Each structure stands twice: as structure tokens, then as C-alpha cells.
Amino acid sequence: MVAGSVVAGAPHLTRVGSLGAVTDVPAKPVGYQQATKALLRASLLDGMRGLLRNGDWSTVTMTDVAAAAGVSRQTVYNEFGSRLGLAQAYATRLTDEFCTVVTDAVHRNVGEVRNALREGFSNFFAISASDPLVQSLLRGEAKADLLRLITTDASPLITRASDQLSAMLQQSWLRVDPTEAHRVGRAISRMALSYIAMPPEGDRDVADDLAEIFAPVLTSAAGAAHR
């Protein structure tokens, strides 16, 4: 069982404890309306991703996204407000995917900080490289305002990722102090997300390089919390 995953029919989450033991903790119930909204948003973003695999962002319309998801055009506008809002939501989901792969890597590599970081970075770089919107950006087919979402205007994404990673560093087997968890989580987020707009060099194992840089820092932070 993957730590942090929800078990169907059971109102709890699994979490890895300080010694690697898996424990059950109560999960907040998700209301029907909230779950329906999340499902709708996921369906719309999936539809957008499918369209981008067959065309460029510049050609994708709100009507196309609505048709791909089987809803009305007005539903798409109600959910995202504008085409830029749709792109922002898509970038937010990519950020959440980054946090998920890093969290999963930490849970799979109990006691192995460097391996966890390397796996997390490597998996995220693979996801980013294969993402059709990122590919469209790198080909220069998207407008400048879209590129700014992941560069000069990326602060909301960095903050979102930092908050998620900070919580994970505190709650996982690492048990990092809150102040250190925020500091390390933000540094990792800023570094990793910068590679969306400028992918890792082909002649370097950048995931390994980043793991080598951050592992001592994270190991020290985790060790300080356990002393």
C-alpha cells in the first residue's frame, strides 16, 4: 500500500511513521459537491491534455475543451473564467504532480534520503518532459503570458509546492522541524520547477546532481529534529 493513499470505502489515510511503520490516521470526509467539482475539473484538464497531444496550445479553444470533456462551453468558463485561467489550473496540477512523485519517492525509500530525492526529481523530469503543454511552451508555440506562468509569475506555484513538501517533510519518517521543512521544501520546489522552462541538460544526470546537493541538507535537518 502506498503511504498517503485512500482506501476505497474506508474513511482513513495511511501514513508512514517516524520509524517507517505504516499507521492509519483519520481523513477529513469529502463532501459530494466538493468531490463532484474535483472530478469535473480533472475531466476538463484531462480533456485539455488530450487536445494538446494532437495540436498546439494556440489552437485549443474553450469550446474544444468542453467537447472533449462532454460538457457545455459555459461550464468550462464557469470553472476557469478564461483561457488563461484554464492554463493556470493546468500548471497547478503539474505542480501537484511534482509534489506527489516526491512524496511517493520519500515513502518508498525509508531511511534513504539521497535515493528518495533522486527518484523524485527523476520522475518529475520525466513527467514534465512528456507533458504536451510544456512541450508546446518549449517549441515557442505558446504566448508569452503562458510562459510567464512557470517563470516570472511562478510564485503561486512555488508557494503551493513548498507548502505541500513542507507538510510532507514534517509528517513523513523524516520528521523535519517546521522551520527547516519550510526552508528546504521551498528550495527544492524552486529548483525543480525551474526545470520546466529549461529542461535538464542531456549530458548530465541532473536528478542525481540535485539529490547530491540536497541530500546532506535534508539529512542534517532530519537529524536535528530527532536529536
Image: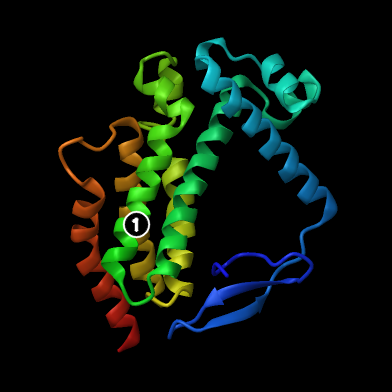
Task: Tell me: residue 178, above or below residue 87.
Answer: below
In this picture, residue 8 sits left or right of residue 209: right
Residue extending farthest to the top is 59
Task: Tell me: residue 26, above or below residue 45.
Answer: below
Query: How far across and how far down the image is residue 14, in percent?
Result: 60, 73
Quarter of image, res 23: bottom right
Q: Residue at x 55, y 75 (%)?
A: 15
Q: Residue at x 32, y 60 (%)?
A: 117
Quarter of image, res 46: top right
Query: How far across and how far down the image is residue 138, in percent?
Result: 35, 22
Q: Residue at x 24, y 65 (%)?
A: 215
Crowding near the residue tagged with mark 1, few <14, some 14–19, many ≥20 C-alpha atoms within 10 Å: many
Q: Residue at x 74, y 64 (%)?
A: 8
**Considering depth in this image, is 5 or 88 the residue closer to the camera?**
5
Q: Where does the N terminus fall, quadrant-wise? A: bottom right
Residue extending farthest to the bottom is 227
The residue to which callout 1 is attached is 119
In this picture, residue 30 sits left or right of residue 82: right
Query: How far across and how far down the image is residue 127, in percent?
Result: 43, 41
Query: How far across and how far down the image is residue 98, in percent?
Result: 44, 49
Q: Where does the C terminus fall, quadrant-wise? A: bottom left
Which residue type carries mark 1?
Answer: Glu
Quarter of image, res 198: top left
